[in-house]
Amino acid sequence: MAWPRPPGASVAPLAGGFGARLQLDGQSYEIRYGPGQDFETPEDFFAPCRAALREPCEEMLRVVEALGVLESLQLDAHGTLRVALPFCGSMQELPILAHFLATRCSGRQGVAKISILASDVQDWAPLGGYWKQKETYVKRWYPHMDLKFCQLDLHALRHPPSSLTFAFHPECTVHRDLWRRILHNVISASAVCIVCTFNDEERKVVLGVCQDLGRQAQCQRNPYYANSKQNGTTPPFLNFLILVR
């Protein structure tokens, strides 16, 4: 099985490069290195997103599109769509989100560029987060998109303004006051924010912050878990979806 590639990407015949294989989720992935291949060098490599996270993420994005979230996103004066990924950790979902934004937002009227800011209080680059590699991946495959990872203490600082925010898995039933402040600093800075939680208690905390901010919130469970086979997935990634406008 080929390494997942951006839509429309063509990989040159392997000449002068070399290949490798990766076992993941019971499947064998072929990875090619070299000019025009999946990765220029082994140093650029990062593993694909696991199915347990990829599949609910893809379903969540289908819901986002169906709800019309992308229809009237704000752009800055230069036609840039600013996207935020707060408390991002390793952001395994990055290739899925980049694909979604490129195919659904690039080319829309007025959108000249998509700029993604991914942040976490901790630097995940030396912890298997592949921050640098993912920045390189976006730069290489998406010419009208840029990605920057950085450390940002969102308890102390308000997030920079964004048009669209994907805030995945705030563990806000632990250290509630700290997380309420973080969520306040994220949601207040975003025109549209999609918060996804593991469980209903976290969902309630998010809704409380939205109420304090006077923001409208629309909630639903991820349809991915309507399938009884998937309902036992532990942890239930992206289980509850909260759309904040």
Image (cartoon, grey):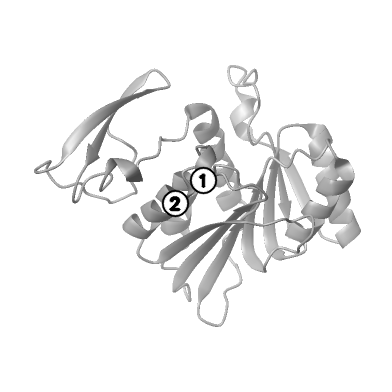
Name which residue lies at 25% across and 48% down.
40
The part of the image, by quadrant, that contains residue 211 is: bottom right
Q: Measured from the top left, where is residue 94 in percent x and y?
A: 49, 47
Does residue 19 appear left or right of residue 147 in this picture? Answer: left
Q: Measured from the top left, where is residue 45 in percent x and y?
A: 35, 41
- Residue matched to label 1: 125
Vertical comparison of 114 with 197: above or below = below
Q: Amino acid at mark 2?
A: Lys
Q: Amino acid at mark 1?
A: Ala
Report whether residue 207 is seen: no
Q: Which numbered marker is on residue 184?
A: none
The part of the image, by quadrant, that contains residue 31 is: top left
Q: Quadrant of the N terminus?
A: top left
Q: Secondary structure at mark 2?
A: helix
- Residue matched to label 2: 132
Report whether residue 232 is seen: yes
From mark 2 to mark 1, how far is it between C-alphas? Answer: 7 Å
Between 128 and 38, the one nearer to me in the picture: 128
Vertical comparison of 180 with 143: above or below = above
Is mark 2 in CB contact (under 8 Å) with mark 1? yes
Does residue 200 appear left or right of residue 46 in this picture? Answer: right
Q: Badge 2: few (under 14), some or many (20 or more) residues near its Cα, within 10 Å?
A: some
Q: Measured from the top left, where is residue 100 in percent x and y?
A: 47, 51
Name which residue lies at 15% across and 47% down.
12
The part of the image, by quadrant, that contains residue 3 is: top left
Does residue 59 appear left or right of residue 14 in this picture? Answer: right
